Each structure stands twice: as C-alpha cells, then as structure tokens.
Amino acid sequence: MKFLALITLSASLASAADICRTSGAGCTGTKFCCSGIQEGVCCTSTTGSTERLWTLPDNSRFQVWSGQSCTGNTGVFKNPTKVTNKCIKFSWPVYSAKWLAGGGTKRSESDSDECAEPNVAIYTLDGVDHKVKIPAGNASVVEDWVEKGEWKLLAELESAE
C-alpha cells in the first residue's frame, strides 16, 4: 500500500508546473512564481501583467483570467509539448492563471477554494541569481520589497535552491 501511495505521489509531482509573473517587459526582471503548482489550482497575484512565464508538462493547456482568484474574462491556450520558461504575451492584464491536463480548449470553471499565491521569488542582484521561498500569505509583501529595492529583506528569506 505504501508503494502505491509513493507511485501516486510521484506521478502528481511529475505533473506540476510553474506559473510566473515577471516585473519587466519580455518576461524579464524579478519573477514571482507559483512553483510546483498542481493541475487545476489557481495561481493568483495582486498585480496584473500582460505576460506570464510558464513551465508546463506536455499535452496540457493553460487558462488566464483578468481578475484575481481566477475570475473575470478568460482565455484558454493549448500546449501540446512540454515547455520550459515560455513567455506568453496577452492583450489584457492577467491577474490569475492555472494549467489543466489535456490539449483541448475547453474552459474550466474557476474553483476559488483552490487558489495559491506565488511561493517563490527569483531575482538578480549584482549579477547573481537568487531564488527564495515566499512565506505563505506574504506574496504582496515580498512584491513590495522588490518594488522598493529592499534586497536585505529578500536575502533573509529561506533559499529555494
């Protein structure tokens, strides 16, 4: 029974994705990511952006919303092959997104009970990349630190590497 549970856990971890908002144009700058997010879980942010950076498994699709918690206007996009750090530009600001298995374009109704905030921030300071964990419930605080250049506060966060 433990072996079966381990196989199930391994399969679910293998089908996780990364959904990131970036602070700069062309998916550059600091990244605020829902790292390792599971299928169907909404990644929501307090700041909208017309771009998202994606790492997705093959045979999947992603859906974006104009509002937080996967609400508002939406669009669905197919992803037939695995992608890593793919920058997608949208014609409207995106505040939330999720990924789904399967290559269709069927839209998923939002389940606002399954939302996550970014859990990782990736930033560059003095030419060195840093990847830190964002404490639960503190994504907007960490985003504010980046906006204000509070690099010492960011350096105190636990490394995600």
Image: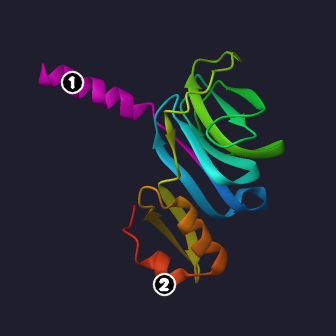
Q: Residue 74 vs residue 12: left or right?
A: right
Q: Tell me if residue 84 can be seen.
A: no
What kind of residue is marked 1?
Ala
Q: Earlier in the sequence, mark 2 or mark 1?
A: 1
Q: Which mark is residue 5?
A: 1
The kind of residue on which mark 2 rests is Lys
Residue that appears at 53% across and 60% down = 139
Q: What residue is pinned by disc 2?
A: 152
* Residue 24 image position (x, y, % from top left): 74, 64
Does residue 138 appear left or right of residue 23 in this picture? left
Circle 2 or circle 1, nearest the eye:
2
For residue 8: magenta?
A: yes
Magenta span has 64? no
Q: Is residue 68 above or below residue 160?
A: above
> Toward the viewer: 130 or 98?
98
The x and y percentages for residue 1 are 12, 18
Magenta region? 1-19
Name of the residue lying farthest toward the front: 113
Helix, strand or loop at disc 1? helix
Outermost residue toward the left in this view: 1
